[in-house]
């Protein structure tokens, strides 16, 4: 701290020198001369107390710089993207960026579609729910018995957008399918017993006796209209939940 005023006091004088004192000097009567030292000390204290003193400004506060602490990450309105990867060693045929087969040009059934000799089977129904894609739930017919699986979607001339057929197998193997007597193009989703989509055959052609598989074992195969999976962001490696199946 430093003082903002200067004291210019002089020693007190006796009464005999009062007449020669300057205006800055202070004279006292002779009768009080013995008390001069004490009075001088008292007046000096009063003068010192009257001086205004400057108090140094405190330093501005600064944020803590502790090494062991870090600033919290900024809040975001959305959670970070998922970093989940398929299980190590899991057989999954990755979905390509573009489909291996082009989208079908047909707007209806294949003109060469044969007539249905018996009519469709009456099958139980269930639901497939896509857990990792913004896709609608799909209502499916359940082909569980051998004769139901053998017929599948043969002779069908149309299928609603969010409808399909699911084939249920007892064996967990690499299943192969064909499009014999199948008049509408399809997507085939091969699904393992835990609900993982291990591969997708897209845009399979109508009335075709070639076989289609993904090279990975599965327990279920879901057939949907061609292009459905790509339209709704469904790819191999994602999970589904089966209800009533």
Image (tube, rainbow, N blue to C red):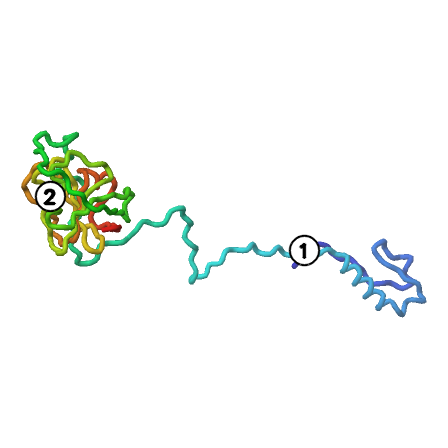
Rendering coords of residue 24 (x, y %): 83, 55
Between 178 and 58, the one nearer to me in the picture: 178
Marking on residue 151:
2
Labelled pair 1, 2 in contact (Cβ < 8 Å): no
The residue singled out by tag 1 in the image is 54
Q: Quadrant of residue 37?
A: bottom right
Report, in whole angstroms, how far the alpha carbon at label 1 lies from the one at label 2. Answer: 100 Å
Question: Residue placed at 19% from the left, 45% from the top?
Answer: 123
Taking the view exactly as shown, the residue that stands out farthest to the right is 31
Taking the view exactly as shown, the residue that stands out farthest to the bottom is 34
Kindly tell me whether residue 100 is visible in this rendering: no
Image-based side of 140 in relation to 77, left or right: left
Kindly tell me whether residue 142 is visible in this rendering: yes
| Image quarter (top left, top right, bottom left or bottom right) of the N terminus | bottom right
Between 143 and 224, the one nearer to me in the picture: 143
Question: Residue placed at 82% from the left, 62% from the top?
Answer: 43
Between 120 and 31, the one nearer to me in the picture: 120
Marking on residue 158:
none
Specify which label sits upstream in the sequence, 1 or 2. 1
Taking the view exactly as shown, the residue that stands out farthest to the left is 209
Image-based side of 209 in relation to 188, left or right: left
Q: Secondary structure at mark 2?
A: helix
Image-based side of 154 in relation to 124, left or right: left
Question: Residue placed at 22% from the left, 56% from the top?
Answer: 194
């Amino acid at each position: 701290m430093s003082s903002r005023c200067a004291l210019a006091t002089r020693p007190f004088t006796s009464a005999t020198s009062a007449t020669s004192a300057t205006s800055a000097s202070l004279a006292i009567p002779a009768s009080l001369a013995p008390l001069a030292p004490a009075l001088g000390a008292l007046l000096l204290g009063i003068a010192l107390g009257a001086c205004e003193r400057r108090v140094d400004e405190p330093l501005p506060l600064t944020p803590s710089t502790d090494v062991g602490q870090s600033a919290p990450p900024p809040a975001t309105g959305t959670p970070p993207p998922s970093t989940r990867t398929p299980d190590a060693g899991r057989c999954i045929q990755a979905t390509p960026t573009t489909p291996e087969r082009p989208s079908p040009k047909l707007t209806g059934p294949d003109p060469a579609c044969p007539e249905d000799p018996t009519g469709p089977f009456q099958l139980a129904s269930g639901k497939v729910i896509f857990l990792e894609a913004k896709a609608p739930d799909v209502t499916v017919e359940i082909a569980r018995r051998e004769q139901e699986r053998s017929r599948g979607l043969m002779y069908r001339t149309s299928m609603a957008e969010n409808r399909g057929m699911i084939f249920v197998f007892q064996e967990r193997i690499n299943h192969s399918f064909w499009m014999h007597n199948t008049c509408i193009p399809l997507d085939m989703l091969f699904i393992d017993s835990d609900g993982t989509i291990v591969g997708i055959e897209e845009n399979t052609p109508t009335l075709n006796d070639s076989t289609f598989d993904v090279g990975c074992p599965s327990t279920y195969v879901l057939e949907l209209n061609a292009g459905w999976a790509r339209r709704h962001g469904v790819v191999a490696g994602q999970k589904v939940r089966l209800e009533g199946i």
